[in-house]
Image: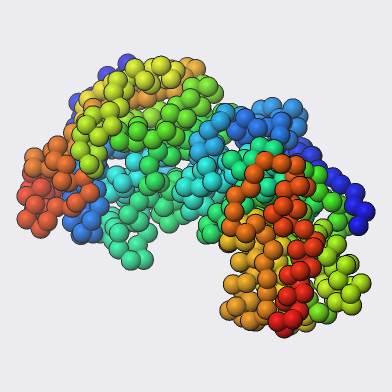
Amino acid sequence: MNWKYASQRKEYGRALIELGKMRKDVVVLDADLSGSTRTADFAKEFPEHFFNCGIAEQNMMGTAAGFAASGKVVYASSFAIFATGRCWDQIRQSIAYPKLNVKICATHAGITVGGDGASHQTGEDVALMRTLPNMTVVVPADAQETYKTTKAFADWPGPCYMRMGRLDFPVITDTDTPFKIGKGTLLREGNDITLIGCGNMVSRCLEAAEALEKRKISAQVINMSSIKPLDEALIEEAAKRTGGIVTAEEHNIVSGLGCAVSCFLAEHVPTPLKRVGLMDTFGESGEGEELMRKYGLTADKIIEAADEVVKRR
Amino acid sequence: MVAYPTDVIAELERKANLIRSHVIRMTRSAGSGHPGGSLSSTDIISALFFKVMNHRSSDPNWEDRDRFVLSKGHAAPAYYAALAESGYFPIDELSTLRKLNSRLQGHPSKNKLPGVEMSTGSLGQGLSVANGMALAAKLDRKTHRIYCICGDGEMQSGQIWEAAMLGAHFELDNVTAFVDRNMLQIDGPTEKIMSIEPLADKWKAFGWHVIEIDGHDMRQILDACDRAKETRGKPTMVIAHTVKGKGVSFMENALSFHGKPPNEEESKKALKELGGDQ
């Protein structure tokens, strides 16, 4: 498919600036990566409301909690592994447990971080955030949805996590595409199998669906950007309609989107399912797209999984 | 410096003694908890709640209140007793500490109990939170202050020193923090487990205004708070030299009472010493 590409991070920065213009209670924190996370865009417009905490993510999360306890809506950013793994206990104790209004918006998630290698990549962040009570988790599928998520977080009470990538993502939504925390979007209808993706794997799901159609397998595609709360009604409907599910994410298959969907289905609508994602492995250095191919985060892998699930139905 | 009248000091000492009696009864009734570190913090907590801080138990969320973060969350019994004695909730409720369905969790929980500003317990985090509150106050051009009590064992946490840097960097002169320097942590003396000295020099080197006091001397505590208020451009760290288990002879400096409540007999003896066995 011929995709247009756009930057999630750029849209994050743009949304922050708009929030800054609209409301006085927004503050933004970063840990020495403001140029990369694009919180620097906000800092330029609203220097008084921006706080660089240095390379000290644990302290940044505690400081964010203090701001939030004082009535501020706090956006705290870093690379995904540092914003979640480095300071998980701080997020748990000082943000999630007291249910404070801190929006952790992390960039450079997954393996498409590229050359930096496994130290800077993460396939664990969604798992880490999803397991925290009170936490909302959103993985936007593209730049436009990142913009909408950033804005929506400001009015969504309590702690939130948003996951962004480093590379530009294929554009699959536009300004009119509906977005609501807790709701997935049915992007394409079909009868034989449902492909449920998040982040940049949604575009791969769409590619896979198109290829499957040529082989007379009718696949529907759901963009499940809201991982928590999960759109259970939409999953149930899809399972009942198509009788088979494939999930796809640029995240460890352990405890990510695939597990969220599987757990729900196992308890409510047992349905043949296969997860496409990082196979419980760390990444490595390389170009983002090369890594996606090497680690099986491709439309071909989704097609393979779909074939297997269709047989098991 | 303010010369506090003798009767003001005496009243604060009486209140502190009352808090100590509550701590003994509460931990005894709970069958667990941390009496040692509660008793070492009691005089500071009493000075803050009954004299230093502006706060309203009738309006716990009053915008201009001074904020208090108990970074050493295990001193919750003393904190809860001070909140109850300030009128935030009925004194009777203190006996529910650590029990099922109680608002008095083993460590403070922000959304359960009125007056609790922040959930704490996992050590090393409270000072960062206090900093965030201080930054928010400055952003809003508010003049209220943020008070924070850390344990000395907490000084071993890296996050404390991250917070030390941030507090000095942003010149948070609206922060008054205390180290309850009782010299003991669970496994033994701090200097034997993981040395934190020279503590005052460390805080000075990190850019803080440092005051060292006897943490059981009300006049010194009040005086330190006044000096902190007058300091511009840097946050204040009060290193309060204290005695773990202070006020109960057989609990003083006794490592065993860090995380163990007194038994029935010890409890009676303690209350008798504190004059609270009515």
Q: Nearer the viewer, residue B234 or B230?
A: B234
With respect to residue B200, does A116 lie above or below?
below
Q: Residue at x 90, y 49 (%)?
A: A4
Q: Nearer the viewer, residue A304 or A61?
A: A304
List x then y, in percent, for residue B43: 24, 35
User: Along the horizontal axis of the image, is A161 left or right of B155?
Assistant: right
Quadrant of the frame with the C terminus of chain B: bottom left
Colour setting: rainbow
List x then y, in percent, for residue B71: 38, 40
Q: Residue at x 62, y 30 (%)?
A: A32
With respect to residue A226, does B133 lie above or below?
above
Q: How many numbered discs sit on the rendered protein?
A: 0
List x then y, in percent, for residue B1: 32, 16
Going by the picture, which residue comes out furthest to the front?
A294
List x then y, in percent, for residue A139: 70, 55
With respect to residue A145, does A218 lie above or below?
below
With respect to residue A94, does B246 lie above or below?
above
User: Along the horizontal axis of the image, is A46 left or right of B116?
Assistant: right
Can residue B222 be seen here? The reply is no
Q: Nearer the viewer, residue A10 or B106?
A: A10
Q: Nearer the viewer, residue A48 or A254?
A: A254
User: Along the horizontal axis of the image, is B148 left or right of A173?
Assistant: left
Q: Residue at x 71, y 41 (%)?
A: A286
Can residue B235 be seen here? The reply is yes
User: Along the horizontal axis of the image, is A61 left or right of B3?
Assistant: right
Q: Residue at x 64, y 40 (%)?
A: A117
